[in-house]
Amino acid sequence: MKTEKLKAESYKLVLLDSHAIIHRAYHALPEFATSKGEPTGALYGLVAMLLKIIMDLKPNFIVACFDLPGPTHRHEAYEAYKSGRAKTDDNLILQLERAKDVFKAFGIPIYSHLGFEADDIIVVPVSTVKYVWNRYVFQILFGGMNIKSFFP
């Protein structure tokens, strides 16, 4: 059977490993806070990065993927997974939760699933796109890219 090459429209889908991006912003930027003392430095970095991605990449779709607290399938496979990591700062935890409000304000859907990390969840839309929309060309960008160029 002869396969025909289709000239497809090009769509950009940006997949965000939100936990990794917010964590990077938290450690890269000053500790901003509201007048009530609520930490906002990582949120500032997230908003600045989203604006830059929207303006520079002009994506058709953006999806935010989040880690959830608790063990994952990786912990089941390897008991010592992340055992050497320090406890997450309370101020970072607050901003990870508030980041969901930022994504909602931008109209960006949020995906997470108990037992899976954001980078595991990123695989799902990629697989779906390849399977369902195989006549289109998607450019997929996620938390593993050189995200530093999108921070202020």
Image: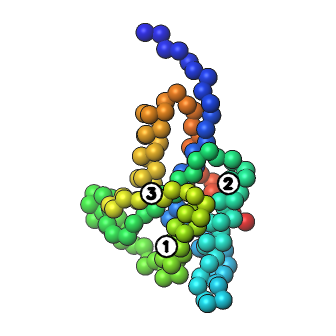
For badge 1, the amino acid type reads Glu
Residue at the disc numbered 1: 97
Total marks shown come to 3
Q: Earlier in the sequence, mark 2 or mark 1?
A: 2
69 vs 29, nearest the viewer: 69
For badge 3, the amino acid type reads Tyr
Report the disc number at residue 55. Answer: none
Q: Earlier in the sequence, mark 3 or mark 2?
A: 2
| Residue 118 in view | no
- Which residue: 55% across, 63% down? 104
**Mark 2 in CB contact with mark 1 (< 8 angstroms):** no
Residue at the disc numbered 3: 111
Residue at the disc numbered 2: 53
| Neighbour tally class for label 1: few under 14, some 14-19, many 20 plus, Cα within 10 Å | few
Element on which disc 3 rests: strand
28 vs 54, nearest the viewer: 54
**The image quarter in which residue 117 lies:** bottom left
